[in-house]
Image (spheres, helix red, strand yellow):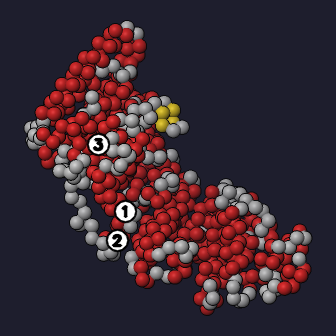
Amino acid sequence: MDKMIADCPYPGCFFCVMKEGNPNKRKSSIMKFFRALPSQDDDGQVLPISGLWNAAMAHPNDPEFIELGIFECMAALIWKGLKNRRWLSHDQNIYIPYYAAHIIGSYTMNMEDFAETAVNAGVIPSLVELLRGRLTWVEQRVAVRALGHLATYASTFPAVASHGEILELCIQLAMSSLEIVYSHFYQYADRRLSYHCDLLTRGMGGKEMESRKAEEWASQLQCWSLQLINCFAFKPEFLSTICKPEFLVKLPGLWGGLVNENSPAGIGLLRTICHHKLGRGPVSSCPGVIEALCNIARSSDDWQYMAIDCLLWLLQDPNTFHKVIEKAAPAVLDLAEISSLGDHKKLGDSILNVLQECIQSHGTGRHSVSNRIKENVEEILHSRERFKWEKSLPKEDLHIKQAAALVVKLEGNSLFSSGNISGAASKYSEALALCPVRSKKERVVLYSNRAQCYLLLQQPLSAISDATRALCLHNPVNRHAKSLWRRAQSYDMLGLAKESLLDAILFINECSQSTDPDLSSRQNKVPDYAERLVKKQMRAAWLFREAAVKHGGVDFEADGGDVYGQGTDDSEWETASESDAGNDGRREISNNDGEMINMLQEK
């Protein structure tokens, strides 16, 4: 080993130090290396730093470097890059502040004692300077990541919170991060900093790869900012700073995009805010936020339960109930048939109990519950009583009810085929009243068929309601393909691109797995009409769309067109254009529509 170190042209070389076999010598040499590195101006310093970055990524729980001064070394290197621009621009030193902040974030990701060591080493002030944007958005990204990890632990959060500007900086960054990345990197491919490109792609891609990675990193910058704000939101004393109307109204739209689908993003922060009474007041005063929560609660994504929690807490709070009841109650009533959602057991029962409490507590007075909502709750309660009563009925009686409902449904299908859409909707309503509550599969079909009628009658809100009810009754929940497609179209009518996109993607996934001959006959080929809708909504819900429009980078005015693609070879898959339904609720059904009816109206 001594021979190997002696042959190295760089005294104290980190890679030679790491090959030292004597534990005591290795420890002593590593400590000496960490102390000396920030004061050195030799070329090639980025090599050991990138080696440490790899080690931190691969073994974030390894304590070896933690107790030998790595955090002090990384903080000093960040300060050096901030204060000495000549050094920063020399050789490849421009990479070093990024790697240093990333190393701090990786080692504090899982271990609270590592985070305590980092705080004691003084890493926070240097990270705050990066968060301010003293360098570029690339360094901001890793700074907010590291500070987010430090803020996660009870023992180190106070140290983060003591820097009052962190919360304000993160709020601004969450709102502006996409525009920053778009205008400083994405928009002009020929002006991109070379070290940004290298960090994004590791030299393994061209401009297209750089753009894709930039979108991913922009999403992370936004979502990690929200995660750090979320740590503050658990403390009531910070809610007044967080719950500014200009920030709250943007939260539902800060969703991270498809490139960061596992992040709870804005809806996760809203859930934390709504959990405390000091947060519920400001949220309830933002009608746009309530409407967005209702849409998310009806959605089929992984964060549906978060929106449901928000709405239920707002309904249970006597100070916010009257502001949200008219919008929140219809949304949660559509979900009352859900038995469970993830870890949320008997969710439908919980929803019904909350609404009953609302009616009992606010039955009269200035802020009383409307008769319409009372009737809707009574309807759900009646169906529960019907379910109990049906348990005592002889099988023969149940079969008679099922047969009667089937006859009426077939009448509805016939009316639909003849173009009498409103008549068909009425027949499906009649069939729902006859159909046993326990016949969930049949009720799924009836709700879904009626949703199709409402869609053609240009009543997207009613279509969304029925499609959601069908999805709640379906087993598994939220996986009925035809209802997903109908709701995707309804959201499209309302201009809700993100919601439409997510349902359309789930529809395509279900088609590929379905045993339904109407859906699987394409041999797992994505239907053309579904592909067109997905493409349209991906443009409309593109992460950089708002920034691109603001900076004139792309013209979206020409977007649109008939995504349902009338007259294509896939007509049997498609929904008739809403313009085909007349004011009287009738539509002419052409000879080419036969197969379409087979798919749209389930037997």
149 displayed left or right of 570: right
Judging depth in this view, the residue of 100 and 133 nearest the camera is 100
| Quarter of image, res 591 | top left
Q: Is residue 334 visible?
A: no
Query: Which amino acid type is shown beneath numbered disc 2?
Result: Ala
Dots 2, 3 in contact, CB < 8 A = no
| Quarter of image, res 446 | top left
Dots 1, 3 in contact, CB < 8 A = no
Look at mark 2 in the image and give the residue it sits on: 548
Of the residues under marks 2 and 3, which one precedes in the sequence?
3
Of the residues under marks 1 and 2, which one precedes in the sequence?
1
Of the residues under marks 1 and 3, which one precedes in the sequence?
3
Describe the element under mark 1 as helix, strand or loop: loop
Residue 514 location, x and y as percent? Answer: 39, 38
Look at mark 3 in the image and give the residue it sits on: 486
Instruction: Name the residue located 68 percent from the left edge and 69 percent from the top edge.
Output: 54
CA separation, marks 2 and 3?
30 Å
Look at mark 1 in the image and give the residue it sits on: 542
Relative to 534, say whether 178 is above or below.
below
Instruction: Name the residue located 81 percent from the left edge and 78 percent from the top edge.
Output: 16
Query: Which amino acid type is shown beneath numbered disc 1?
Result: Trp
Query: Which amino acid type is shown beneath numbered disc 3?
Result: Arg
Dots 1, 2 in contact, CB < 8 A = yes
CA separation, marks 1 and 3?
22 Å
Residue 12 location, x and y as percent? Answer: 81, 82
Residue 471 location, x and y as percent? Answer: 37, 36
